[in-house]
Image (cartoon, rainbow, N blue to C red):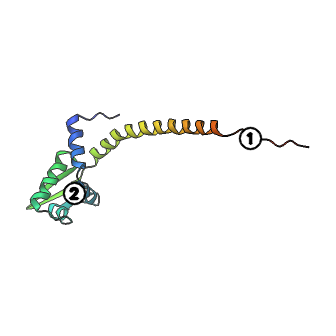
Amino acid sequence: MVELQTSQLDSLFHALGDSTRRRMLRDLAGGERTVSQLAEPFAISLAAASKHIKALENAGLIHREVRGRTHVCRLEPGPLASAHEWLSFYQRFWTDRLDVLERLLREEEARKEPPSKETPND
């Protein structure tokens, strides 16, 4: 299991915990966007959009580049892969537990079934 520093993991999940920021990341998966383009689908100010972008930057999920007076953002997928790897541990844990539960339920059901009656051959 990948061990991320607690502060990195905290900032990553903090950033992903907001639906506006998740939507911004999804938009950035399609390519670079300006801050204005990222703010456009939401009823928020550019200042509010910048705060969301800053949270994404702090988590390492995006990179912002200043080109003249325009701020252009692009997705940095590395932290998402790390989060996926961290979550995969728990996915395997619960899959294993559910497999055991399924086996136990099948065994319980098999014990409840009456023995099959065979018809004698004449």
Query: Considering the numbered disc 2 on the image, is that residue within a helix, a strand or a loop?
Result: helix
What is the quadrant of the N terminus in the image? top left
In the image, farthest residue toward the right:
122
Q: Give the mark, 2 or 1, whose residue is nearer the N terminus.
A: 2
Q: Which mark is residue 20?
A: 2
Q: Is residue 95 above or below residue 18?
A: above
Residue 44 horizontal/vertical position (percent): 14, 62
Q: Residues within 10 Å of mark 1 (few under 14, many from 20)?
A: few
Which-is-in-front pick, marks 2 and 1?
A: 1
Q: Is residue 82 left or right of residue 6?
A: right
Q: Are marks 2 and 1 in contact (CB under 8 Å)?
A: no
Query: Considering the numbered disc 1 on the image, is that residue within a helix, a strand or a loop?
Result: loop
Q: Nearer the viewer, residue 99 or 84?
A: 99
Residue 84 horizontal/vertical position (percent): 34, 43
Res 103 → quadrant = top right
Amino acid type of the residue that numbered disc 2 sits on in the rendered structure: Thr
What is the quadrant of the C terminus in the image? top right
Q: Residue at x 21, y 39 (%)?
A: 8
Amino acid type of the residue that numbered disc 1 sits on in the rendered structure: Ser
Q: Residue at x 14, y 54 (%)?
A: 65
Residue 9 horizontal/vertical position (percent): 24, 39
Q: Residue at x 29, y 46 (%)?
A: 80
Residue 31 horizontal/vertical position (percent): 26, 60
Q: Which mark is residue 96?
A: none
Q: Residue at x 19, y 56 (%)?
A: 73
Q: Which mark is residue 116?
A: 1
Q: Is residue 104 above or below residue 43?
A: above
Q: Is residue 10 above or below residue 15?
A: above
Cα separation, mark 2 vs mark 1, equals 59 Å
